[in-house]
Amino acid sequence: MKNVSIRIMALCLVLALIVSLVGCTKAPVQTTVKEIVIGVVAPMTGDVATFGKSTRQGVELAVKQINDKGGINGSTVVIKAEDDKNDPVEAANAALKLISKDKVIGIVGSVASKCTLAAAPIAQSNKIPLISGTSTNEKVTQVGDFIFRACFIDPFQGLVMAKFASENLKKTTAAVLFDIDNDYTKGLAEQFKLNFEKMGGKVLAYETYGKGDQDFNAQLTKIKSFGPEILFLPDYYNTVGLIAKQARAQGIKAIFLGGDGWDSEDLVKIGGDAIEGGYFSNHYSPDSTSPEAVSFRSAYEAAFKATPDALAALAYDAANILMEGIKQAKTTDGTAVRNAMAGLKNFKAVSGNVSFDSNRNPIKGAVILKVQGGKQVFEAVINP
Ligand code: PHE
């Protein structure tokens, strides 16, 4: 009797071992789904609607090119896009809907750091890879290991503009005016100040405003009284255009500097002559001569009858990075796709070659553009 039960126990053990071994060595499930759905979260309406339009078009072009070549491992790629209206609450809801209802494999977006910071925890907790083309605030990818970006980060961008002010323009005094309610403008303001002061520059005034403010005259009066050579304006094109007009109307002569948020054809429509002569750092110039940038520009112009801006280029890059991850993973499992994305080396992107550091940030150079004759003219490249 005792012998029998020992034999049964031994048999059970062997069986358990076999089951667990099979479980361990099982390869990722090869999915032969017909369609691969990827999500896009971007501001299609609201105060920065040109950002959403460019982002959407960038992703559409990347997906069309992949589908024209037969899709990913035989599956057609389909886009589900959601408008976050540049509002963090909407961005979080959009991510939730894309994941729970549309069953996306990955998400491209959002544009503004404050929105991506709200959407990212949802992607992270559902183990769905999310890649923002454009969110430069350092905290974005710190949300977790499923969160990536295709752009450089604000500590670098702040350094680039401080260096440009100090070394290229040879200026020693500046003022900074920024939105205290926006992670992006706040982070970039801090980084510019930190680096400009390290280089021996003086920040004479460090002034703030709040979300949705339209009248900056009180802050500008104070700034004017210090007479800075530089006025750093790290906000999006719509607000920068308004500030530039009010500053010139007050007689402020400072050179305006800013960051990637200036990138919109609407900057000069809003800022007019006031923004002439301003400089901003950016990720991409349509005049870029790399083979990837040249072929992207011509395909984009053919498809949309418009010159691509940095948002379009970065959304195109972000979508391609996500799709390359899905292709290499050979499965739609979120963790496998995330691992393939993290392992990409020197991925040929329009905005420069992408390899991710340990925080899933690519290391790339910046371009500086000048607003001249109502156009964005290439001024310099600054490498890390
Ligand atoms: N970097 C901005 C942010 O993080 C977004 C942006 C990128 C806007 C590029 C314009 C161009 O909020």
Image (spheres, rainbow, N blue to C red):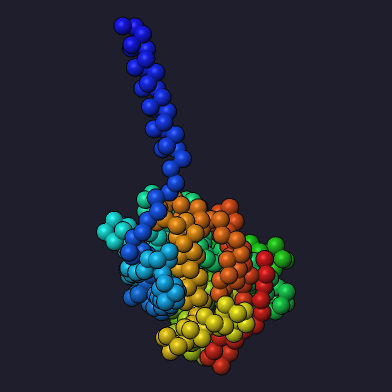
Residue at horizontal 42 percent and vertical 76 percent from the top: 68
Q: Quadrant of residue 64?
A: bottom left
Relative height, residue 258 to residue 6 (above, below): below
Q: Is residue 94 above or below residue 49?
A: above
Query: Residue 187's spot in the image, x, y percent?
Result: 53, 62
- Please determine whether, in this image, residue 39 is positioned above or below residue 19: below
Residue under the image location 56 percent in, 86 percent down: 376
- Name the quadrant of the C terminus: bottom right
**Residue 47 rendering spot, x and y as whole percentages:** 37, 75
Residue drawn at (43%, 89%) of the image = 305
**Residue occupying the far left of the picture:** 101
Nearer-the-camera pick, 320 or 65: 65
Q: Would you identify the image quadrant in which residue 372 lies? A: bottom right
Residue 144 location in percent, x, y? Answer: 47, 51
Residue pictured at 46% horizontal, 40% vertical: 25
* Residue 231 in the image, given as x and y percentages of width and height: 58, 76
Would you say 25 lies left or right of 347 here? left
